[in-house]
Image: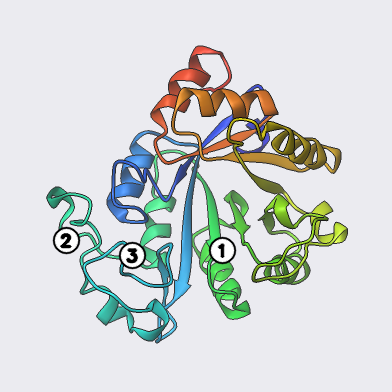
Amino acid sequence: MWEQESEKNILIVGHRGIRSLYPENTLVSFRAALDLKLDLIEFDVHFTRDRHIVVCHDADIRRTTNGEGLICDMTLEELQTYDAGSHLSPQFAGEHIPTLKEVLKLMAGAAYPVLLNVEIKAYDHELVDQTIAELEAYGLAGRSVIACFNAEIIGYIQEAYPGMKTQGYPRWCMEPYTGEGYLITEELYEKMFGIGIPIAKDGEEEKMHRAVAMAKQYGIRPWLFCADDEDSVKKAVEAGATNITCNNPYPAIAYLVREGLHKLL
């Protein structure tokens, strides 16, 4: 699957499953993404207090469940008592925050070789180690890329797991960065497999195009996010994207297939 990715066959990434239509990072959202045969599925991982890996975007469950509190302060048993579906629609009541094992079992059993984009949300080497160990246990490590907004974690992965694909973000790449994390050095940058690049708002396209050009200069795949309407998809294509992340993948599928830029699985 990775070898099929190019500007002429742009892969489509389901952001937290199909986030716009299903409760994000839940099994029902991932099943919907698999039913649509999206090329990649993106999700996020955290540790619970008792060191189980769970799939959730935020450190606090307030936004995506009927509970509140930090994942790192809860046991897995406690965490899974909360409803992660009904906030979006009553039809999704009973969905829970899944474990990484539950998600990987689903992905490993898919009808096609789906690719995975796994974002490390808590900047913890042990979380990296256990996540990669579980990917290997399910035979999915070769189909996965590990993403993180923290350059130190990216560097750790590249050093400890040189065969593991990594993804960083261009606002760190040879630019001053004042947020939490570390500046990505040129050495880290040139070892990246993919780079996440936000799709520019009107009038800001030049920066997006520079980021894509820089990635290609280093042989890194430019991955643009998030495209949920045709105009955004066209911007990503014109910039030179090789994959596009979507909360709602339907506009991207329709446009890319119509233009001969995406092969349906």
Amino acid type for the residue under numbered disc 1: Glu
Q: Earlier in the sequence, mark 1 or mark 2?
A: 2
Image spot of residue 86 (x, y percent): 18, 56
Q: Separation of disc 1 and disc 3 at Cα?
A: 19 Å
* Camera-side residue of 85 and 200: 200
Q: Is residue 210 left or right of residue 194?
A: right
Residue furthest toward the front? 203
Q: Quadrant of the N terminus?
A: top right
* Camera-side residue of 211 and 204: 204
What label sits on residue 91 in the rendered view? none
Image spot of residue 154 (x, y percent): 70, 65
Q: Secondary structure at mark 3?
A: loop
Q: Secondary structure at mark 1?
A: helix
Q: Is residue 174 above or below residue 197?
A: below
Amino acid type for the residue under numbered disc 3: Pro
Q: Is residue 217 above or below residue 117?
A: above
Residue furthest toward the left? 90
Q: Is residue 112 left or right of residue 206?
A: left
Q: Separation of disc 1 and disc 2 at Cα?
A: 30 Å
Q: Separation of disc 2 and disc 3 at Cα?
A: 12 Å
Residue at which label 2 appears: 94
What label sits on residue 98 in the rendered view? 3
The image's colour scheme reads rainbow
Q: Is residue 126 above or below residue 157?
A: below
Residue at which label 1 appears: 136
Q: Residue at x 39, y 39 (%)?
A: 111
Image spot of residue 62 (x, y percent): 30, 69
In this view of the protein, can residue 264 be seen by the observer? no
